[in-house]
Amino acid sequence: MNPSLLRIEELSLTLDEEETLLPQKVAKLLNLPTEKILTCDIVKKAFDSRNKSNILFVYALNVDLGNNEAFLKSFQTPKNQKNIQRYRIRLIEPFVYEIKPLPEKSTHKRPIIVGTWPSGLFCGLALALAGMKPILLERGSEVNKRVQTVHKFFTDGTLDPNCNVQFGEGGAGTFSDGKLYTLINDPRSTFVFQALVDAGAPAEIMYSARPHIGTDRLRGVVRNLRKRIISLGGEVLFDTCMTDIEIEDGKIQAVITSTGKRFETDDFVFGIGHSARDTYEMLHAKWFQIEQKPFAIGVRIEHPRKCIDQAQFWNACLHHKLPTANYKLVSHHEKNRSVYTFCMCPWGFVVPASSEAGRLTVNGMSEYSQDSINSNSALLVNVLPSDFWSDHPLAGIEFQRKWEEKAFQAGGGNHHAPAQLVGDFLKDVPSTKLWSIQSTYLPALTMTDLSLCLPDFVISALREALPQFDKKIHGFAQNDAILIGIEARSSAVLRFQRDESCESNIKGAYPAGEGAWYAWGITSSAIDWLLVAESIMRKRKKNK
């Protein structure tokens, strides 16, 4: 059993106080001499900006006194109950996630994993640590080649349908902010974060309340995770698209690839992401049980970074300790519609994220240093299955395609993104030029009328929400803020059915992660794929 530690939460420091004061603050809280604090480790760090004149850093700490259990018993007196409740002082046992190698049998077939981030890599890592030597298939290129291909796309609009912002080593996450924030409270996240740090991610992700890696550092992280899997006996094949599968008596038999290779397997794991539409179609034709689900569509909104920082931090916006300002906004409307911000990229970039010819969608990303001239966020409106025009399981894909085609045409047919100034959008007049704000979008913007490429219910909901958001963040609806269309890939438009062992209706086939709609974001996807790996390992143990 792991030794217990004291967990103390909600301990705060002002902007002018150094973290070296934390042991002293703990000692004062516990009525102990400072030298009695053997260790004082930060497990969570956030900031509280509700009082703009007194912004605080707020900490959760693991503290070791050497006799933690005995001390807490003696400390739990009526006199101390107020502080015990306020700072949630309690004993915790650190969670250790261990994967032990399984005995190998000659009859065991190697697991096949389709997709390489974050789902595929973490499932692959777990199975590799168990000695199962997984084979990972990725339709796109390895990360160095992929970066060159994507940068060419950003520059001149040349799209490679198999290697782009959506496809290639690291999946869509490689060209994103690398956000790790999640609402899931699962101890496996510690394993995920430690694996990322070991692969080159910044150490502060272990305790930051808003952890992010940045697109520039993510590239090295995914490469190092791949190398670790290979060192454990795994194999990673790039430019290798799954084109077919073989099923017999309701059970997976083999995976067929674009290179003509056939891989026999008893365990087929697919983390295909939310944009592999041709793969969705193939799996549907193979009688996988798929159902429609709601998703969202909208725009990216760009503001000068100083505007957002000042609105959130006021006079402290230039303080060297404060991170770049973030926000999360939501507005509820009639007919079950909501408008909300998503994937906010402080000091980031807006980028084209298309994966099909003749269609345009955008996304946001930022580097680790977050040093762009603007901050941006998705501004989305929920889409319901009743909006799809059909009850077909893949109808949501056709809904996306329709509006992405309209966005491509509105932008000029060359991956220039259609855009409109907020002031013009609210007055329902087309925009003809940018004003004082310079956009980060490449290749270029086409100033136009966004009603040409978004459903009427999205346009009306955005027009109602923008003034409401401006009341919460002054300047959010400023006339020259830029709306860039369209964002249509915030989540999957369907869900694969699976049972409590994570298997689909096809035995030995495991859907998970964002593309199957069992997670939303890097951390939750990684955790979901660890659950899949655990299920496969339990099955192997049972059938040994």
Image (spheres, rainbow, N blue to C red):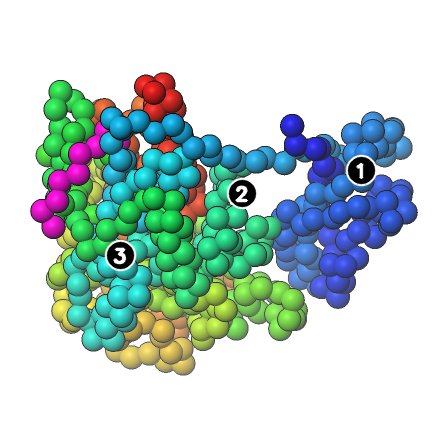
Q: Does the magenta stretch include residue 260?
A: yes
Q: Is residue 196 left or right of residue 5?
A: left
Residue 122: image location, x then y, percent: 39, 43
* Label 1 to label 2: alpha-carbon separation: 23 Å
In the rendered view, does 230 fall on the left or right side of 307?
left
Dot 3: element: loop
Q: How many marks?
A: 3
Q: Residue 66 carries which label?
A: 1
Check if mark 1's residue and mark 2's residue have beta carbons within 8 Å: no
From the image, state whether disc 1 or disc 3 is nearer to you.
Answer: 1
Residue at mark 1 to residue at mark 3: CA–CA distance: 49 Å
Q: Earlier in the sequence, mark 3 or mark 2?
A: 3
Q: Position of residue 196 (x, y in %)?
A: 47, 52
Q: Is mark 2 on a helix, strand or loop?
A: helix
Question: Is the residue marked by circle 1 packed among few (<14), some (14-19), or many (20+) residues within 10 Å?
Answer: some
Q: Which residue is drawn at 34% across and 35% down?
A: 132
Q: Name which of mark 1 and mark 3 comes first in the sequence.
A: 1
Q: Which mark is residue 168?
A: 3
Where disc 1 sits, the SS reads loop
Residue depicted at x 25% and y 75%: 155
Q: Is the magenta stretch mostly helix, strand or loop?
A: loop
- Image disc number at residue 432: none
Q: What residue type is labelled 2?
A: Thr
Q: Quadrant of residue 4?
A: top right
Q: Is residue 264 left or right of residue 197?
A: left
Q: Quadrant of residue 61?
A: top right
Q: Where does the magenta region start and end? A: 259-267
Sequence-wise first label, 1 or 2: 1
